[in-house]
Image: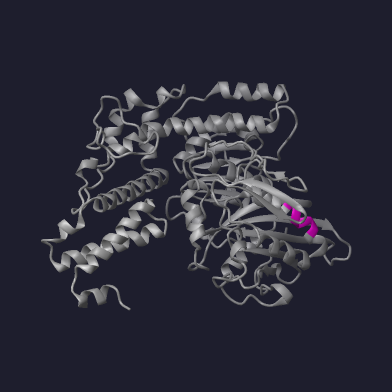
Amino acid sequence: MDQGAGAGQQPARGRLGAPSSGTRAPGTPWARFSAWLECVCVVTFDLELGQALELVYPSDFQLTDKEKSSICYLSFPDSHSGCLGDTQFSFRIRQCGGQRRPGHVGEKRGDSGAPASLQREPAHFFGYVYFRQVKDSSMKRGYFQKSLVLLSRLPFVRLFQALLGLVAPEFFDKLAPCLEAVCNEIDQWPAPAPGQTLNLPIMGVVLQVHIPLRADTPEPGPPKQSSHETLLPAPVVLPSVHELDLFRCFRPVLAHVQLLWELMLLGEPLLVLAPSPAVSSEMVLALTSCLQPLKFCCDYRPYFTIHDSEFKEFTTRTQAPPNVVLGVTNPFFIKTLQHWPHILRVGEPKMSGDLPKQVKLKKPSRLKTLDTKPGLYTAYTAHLHRDKALLRRLLKGLQKKRPSDVQTAVLRRHLLELTQSFIIPLVRPARGGGRGAGSGPDSLPSRPQEHYMASLMPLQKGIVPWKTPPQIRPFCQDEFLQGLERAGPQLTCVLKGDWLGLYRRFFKSPHFDGWYRQRHREMTQKLEVLHLEAICEANIEIWMKDKSEVEVVDLILKLRERLVRAQGHQLPVKEATLTRARLYIDTAIGSLPKDLQAVLCPP
């Protein structure tokens, strides 16, 4: 597909052809729509401009010029793909500038209950694309070329692909009126609340989806229709809002799944060169999903072109390659990024009954800038031995014509158990090893399997009402590594290898940093909650008897700050504790002189 230099120059136009007029104000009729999507874009090919943004809906959603240009280029396959007919793929772009609209309280509450990997992206947009290219003699170039793009902050690739599959064919026939009707239907959907099974009507069809909850098992079954309601027509039940057919995505690389899992775990730079945006984006999304339940903390781009605004940033040779997984279709990247340590070249997918030819491990020195054969070009040596039993099981499934979703379940469970075996020693203390001050019977409660992190917490008896809570002990890597031989992953995983070396490299990766920051944040919040509960269980009147006005005012301000955070769902505080805290604030204010009361409680 030709890439025009003027992409994105045409002004976005919304309903009735009105130009895009600014950011969406809070309280508009599009509040429910915004819980799912930022906007819908239509990208077409203009003979003078190349790819051009034809429509943005709702028309009042503001995109910067850089974002418009990126959306235009990433919504069309490049000239090396040769995609005819209908193609679906996805991309991910960095948001330019500040926040577009205020986040709703419901969104914050939803994110707090969602798995880390499914929370909204605060600094990136996902683009879900349905591209059509068909011969059309009425067009000057002889082809009809247009893309319908859903822009969202939610990584619900399975849901939005299904939605595009329903909407896009109808849109290409009826154009703008159809799009307006669809957006109005989405604006009636309930918010994507974690733990809920939702019925989402669209164009005469009801999509039924389950929004995962953080406490859900990693492999929830398909949502079941509620017995007390009968939906007509019967809903189309999606087994997942986000999980791809992992077996289909990994078919050409099954022999190297564990090595790729290690590369993802360590946040290594990886270039994925594929024959089409569909193969590229699915491979990248499959790779970034194989660390669940860990959140993928590095950057990733399911589809990337030489016209992207970050092209120079990612291809510079003046510094080490960034921690990013990059999906491309242009062979030019082989030459540009040949200094990258890992390059995966995959061919056209073959969906025959037999296992396709597996890509071979090859040294980077064998990488050719032209006509590069499929292969995983890397000098990396895996720390863990390959699990041959997994490959035999998947081959046996192919021979027995086992459905792809069953094969995917086998593969996903293997990766899940591998990740959990790696993580459990980090969160569970070594038996008989050095335990922190919080590992005794008085230590603070923790989530299941998080005893090591709990050992870093102070003793609960050390949290007293009128003193600053004690500090959380720092994570000690040497202490953890010393106990690895007694309580390492070998207790839950049959794989042999250099686990110690893998942990040492993991500690230097963005994923350890992201994982530890999240755990430390949760522990700090737990300390604040316990401290607030300790205050509310104490007798405030006795405490105030010998306290100065400054000390009383300081307590009032601190309690108010905790209440504000709790009401914003940043602290998991019980309602009874909040009620008692409000009563304490009123009692403390009532003990102060009238002039101070007027300052603290202005009319």
Q: Residue at x 41, y 60 (%)?
A: 568
Q: Which residues are magenta?
A: 165-170
How are the residues colored? Answer: one colour
Which residue occupies the extreme left position in the image?
A: 546
Task: Say whether residue 84 is magenta.
Answer: no
Q: Position of residue 418 (x, y in %)?
A: 48, 30
Residue in the foreground of this view, choosing between 279 and 153: 153
525, above or below 220, in the image: below
Q: Residue at x 29, y 60 (%)?
A: 583
Determine the image quadrant of residue 26: bottom right
Q: Position of residue 197 (x, y in %)?
A: 61, 46
The secondary structure making up most of the magenta span is helix
Task: Inspect this view and state whether residue 462 appears.
Answer: yes
406, above or below 239, in the image: above
Q: Position of residue 445 (x, y in %)?
A: 33, 39
Q: Residue at x 71, y 60 (%)?
A: 148
Q: Is residue 398 left or right of residue 334?
A: right
Count of labels shown? Answer: 0
Q: Is residue 444 left or right of residue 353?
A: left
Determine the image quadrant of residue 223: top right
Residue in the foreground of this view, choosing between 41 and 464: 464
Determine the image quadrant of residue 224: top right
Residue in the foreground of this view, choosing between 331 and 497: 497
Q: Looking at the rendering, in which quadrant would you find the N terminus?
A: bottom right
Q: Is residue 372 left or right of residue 572?
A: right
Q: Position of residue 13 (x, y in %)?
A: 69, 73
Q: Residue at x 67, y 30 (%)?
A: 357
Task: Say whether residue 168 is magenta.
Answer: yes
Task: Inspect this view and state whether residue 379 appears.
Answer: no
Q: Looking at the rendering, in which quadrant would you find the C terminus?
A: bottom left
